[in-house]
Image: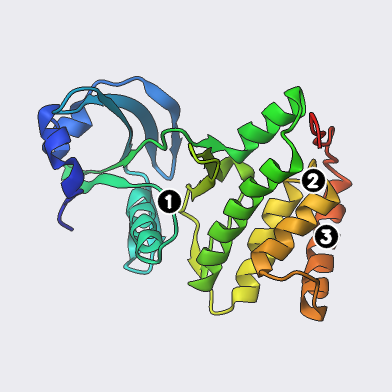
Amino acid sequence: MKDFVNERWRTILARNGLTDFDALWDLKADWFEEPNHRRGGWSGVSRCELDRPEGGKVAIFLKRQENHKARIWSHPVHGAPTFLREFKHIMHYRECGVATLEPVYFGMHKAGKDYRAILVTEELTGFVAMEDRVQDWLKHGAPPRKERLLHLEAVATLLRTMHDHGIQHNCYFPKHVFTRINDDGSVDARVIDLEKSRWRPSRTVCAIRDLYTLNHHSLCWSTSDRLWFFKSYLQIGRLTPFAKWLWRLIERRSQRKNRVNPPRRRIVAKQD
């Protein structure tokens, strides 16, 4: 597979002497996430700041792995670097209009008996993971409900767009969903960690999995806020028979697991 280079980034990479696979592989950078060793190899992430040709800095996440493979449909016997699957998912999400990471570079090379892969993406500047945002609200008090609902609406729209294209994320946790408050007060959302995404023929199948996952990890939200999110996702004002069935199913599953890991605190607004 030929190396991918985002044309918008070609001059930036050249400005920093990172024009090929070897230069990126040899770049000295501290680990943002310590390498994990499994699948017979290793995989790690670094955060790097690059110089812009016109001045200033821009941040990227540089992911490198060696002999870290998994079997996929195109490589069913020997497997392929897990970054290949993640890169393909990033490109598919973007083709479907799902807001996610911007790819900068991807490449796979063989060094002797070792299989190496690099995936570079742009940092989500100004975005905060919903998990971190909610933890801050739990600690210091949440904003008024009107502002909270802007975040919920952005996250619901993002998830609905995925499911409209048959994409099931499979790990739709608050830590994988990022939001940003724009200067005009609107909110944008992005989703990351796409490696385990799958295509499903049924939008309902996608919804059951991803809505349950998000709901179970968002039980610190009030029931009214979670129900508002659910209706926003379905684009309905009142619950239909199907919506009631789906909501009860998701709630039952969440409450069943909640008996093991109940939420310690609930979101309380500074003022509502």
Mark 3 and mark 2 lie on one chain; the one further toward the N terminus is 2
For label 2, the SS is: loop
- In the image: residue 14, left or right of residue 178: left
**Where's residue 12, x and y in %?**
16, 34
Q: CA distance from mark 2 to mark 1?
A: 25 Å
Marks 3 and 1, the one that precedes in the sequence? 1
| Count of residue discs | 3
Marks 2 and 1 in Cβ contact (< 8 Å): no
Residue displayed at 64% across by 37% down: 131
Q: Which residue is mark 2?
A: 219
6 w.r.t. 22: above or below: below
Along the viewing direction, whichever of 62 and 237 lies nearer the viewer:
237
Residue located at (56% from left, 37% from top): 129
Where residue 6 sits: x, y (%)?
20, 48
Residue found at the very far front of the displayed protein: 184
Using a 10 Å C-alpha cutoff, classify the residue at mark 2 as few (fewer than 14 neighbours), some (14 to 19) or many (20 or more).
many
Image vertical order of residue 166 relative to residue 101, above or below: below
Instruction: Identify the amino acid type marked 2.
Output: Leu
Q: Looking at the rendered structure, which numbered label has been put on residue 246?
A: none
215 sits left or right of 257 in the view: left
The residue pinned by badge 3 equals 251
For badge 1, the amino acid type reads Thr
Foreground tag (3 vs 1)? 1
Q: Nearer the viewer, residue 260 or 194?
A: 194
